[in-house]
Image: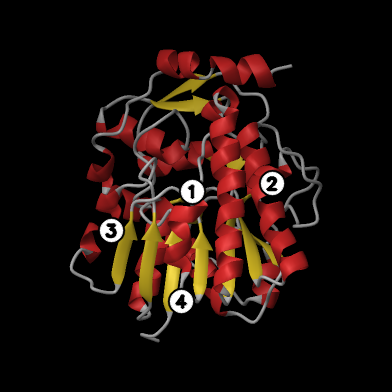
């Protein structure tokens, strides 16, 4: 497999770096495009002497700059995107330009380069507040905020390039991915980064509402395996949910992490449950999550020092940071 060239956009990020790990382990030559907005070069430091890895500090919003990196590439894994709810409300153009225009540039470059497969990191946030659980891929699309909308429109773009131009594509709708190397900085967002920084600082976990809401926490190496299997499969122009097979309360997560809790107001636009129907990906791709929540949390706690420099959120600072969330979504 040493003659296979794979490209990972956002490859210095949380999920992207784990995909890079998987590809290098299989003998791929790997190219990474990352502008380091959220990705960290340190996430790939353990590969710094690997001659099969090349990192390009480029922005996917500039098609002319990124196009040469696609030459000779077999597989493209498109993860470069802006995340988080609040900044997507405050700066929608940043999200439109990165998550939609950037995705357009990536699929166009992939099409012109004649790649074998492009796998896109879609988001389960496209379902909004679903009517049924587990939630199937056929559920109604109901994005609640600009981040969810732009990730969905990016997904539509990828699938449309598959339909019209024959670009072989798969989109994976990811459910609550967690694990080592998850984001440590930036706006108040993913629960694990918030909780781990609070634990290191000896502060209570800021639990939204009662904490009885549940999430389909899916471990990152399982997600990386789903991307790898999707790329190498003969399946094209399909969309799959990627979930753990369970849904777990935030209170259970706090119990596993170990610490005191303080409650903050429930937020508009957030579902009480996320829970993927994963029967389609199991049947067609043969993928199944292997890591239990208990195992995944243990792996994170073993590397908790990674979050030492992360911001430590309190009820007051969260209240300030989420004012626009309540202002625009709480109608």
Foreground residue among 88 and 196: 88
For the residue carrying disc 3, how many other residues have a C-alpha within 10 Å: few (<14), some (14-19), or many (20+)? Answer: some
Give the image quarter of residue 255: top left
Disc 2 element: helix
Q: CA distance from mark 4 to mark 1?
A: 19 Å
Q: CA distance from mark 2 to mark 4?
A: 27 Å
Q: CA distance from mark 1 to mark 3?
A: 23 Å
In this picture, residue 266 sits left or right of residue 63 = right
- Residue 153, numbered circle: 2
- Res. 106 visible in picture: yes
- Residue 72, numbered circle: 4
Disc 4 element: loop
In this picture, residue 328 sits left or right of residue 249 = right
Labels 2 and 4 touching (C-beta < 8 A): no
| Placement of 216 over or under 108, stated as above or below | above
Labels 3 and 2 touching (C-beta < 8 A): no
Residue 68 at x, y = what percent? 44, 64
| Placement of 89 over or under 47, stated as above or below | above
Residue that mark 3 sits on: 44
For the residue carrying disc 1, how many other residues have a C-alpha within 10 Å: few (<14), some (14-19), or many (20+)? Answer: some
Residue 106 at x, y = what percent? 55, 57
Viewport quadrant of the C terminus: top right
Task: Nearest to the eye among marks 3 and 2: give it.
Answer: 2
For the residue carrying disc 4, how many other residues have a C-alpha within 10 Å: few (<14), some (14-19), or many (20+)? Answer: some
Ranked by sequence position, the earlier of labels 1 and 3 is 3
Residue that mark 1 sits on: 62
């Amino acid at each position: 497999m040493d003659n296979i060239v794979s490209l990972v956009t956002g490859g210095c990020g949380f999920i992207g770096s784990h995909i890079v790990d998987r590809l290098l382990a299989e003998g791929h030559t790997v190219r990474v495009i990352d502008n380091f907005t959220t990705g960290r070069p340190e996430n790939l430091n353990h590969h710094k002497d690997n001659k099969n890895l090349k990192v390009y500090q480029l922005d996917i919003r500039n098609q002319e700059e990124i196009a040469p990196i696609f030459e000779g590439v077999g597989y493209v894994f498109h993860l470069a995107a802006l995340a988080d709810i609040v900044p997507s409300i405050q700066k929608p153009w940043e999200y439109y330009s990165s998550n939609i225009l950037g995705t357009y540039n990536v699929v166009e470059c992939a099409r012109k380069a004649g790649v074998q497969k492009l796998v896109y990191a879609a988001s389960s946030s496209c379902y909004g507040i679903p009517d049924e659980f587990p939630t199937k891929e056929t559920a109604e699309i109901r994005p609640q905020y600009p981040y969810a909308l732009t990730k969905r429109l990016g997904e539509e773009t990828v699938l449309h390039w598959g339909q019209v131009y024959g670009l072989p594509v798969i989109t994976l709708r990811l459910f609550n991915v967690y694990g080592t190397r998850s984001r440590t900085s930036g706006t108040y967002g993913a629960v694990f980064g918030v909780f781990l920084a609070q634990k290191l600082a000896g502060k209570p976990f800021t639990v939204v509402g009662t904490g009885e809401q549940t999430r389909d926490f899916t471990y990152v190496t399982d997600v990386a395996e789903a991307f790898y299997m999707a790329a190498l499969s003969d399946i094209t122009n399909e969309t799959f949910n990627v979930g753990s097979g369970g849904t777990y309360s935030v209170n259970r997560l706090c119990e596993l992490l170990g610490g005191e809790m303080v409650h903050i107001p429930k937020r508009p636009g957030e579902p009480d449950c996320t829970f993927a129907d994963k029967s389609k990906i199991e049947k067609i791709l043969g993928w199944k999550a292997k890591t239990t929540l208990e195992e995944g949390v243990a792996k994170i706690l073993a590397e908790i020092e990674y979050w030492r420099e992360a911001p430590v959120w309190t009820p007051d600072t969260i209240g300030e940071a989420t004012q626009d969330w309540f202002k625009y979504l709480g109608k």
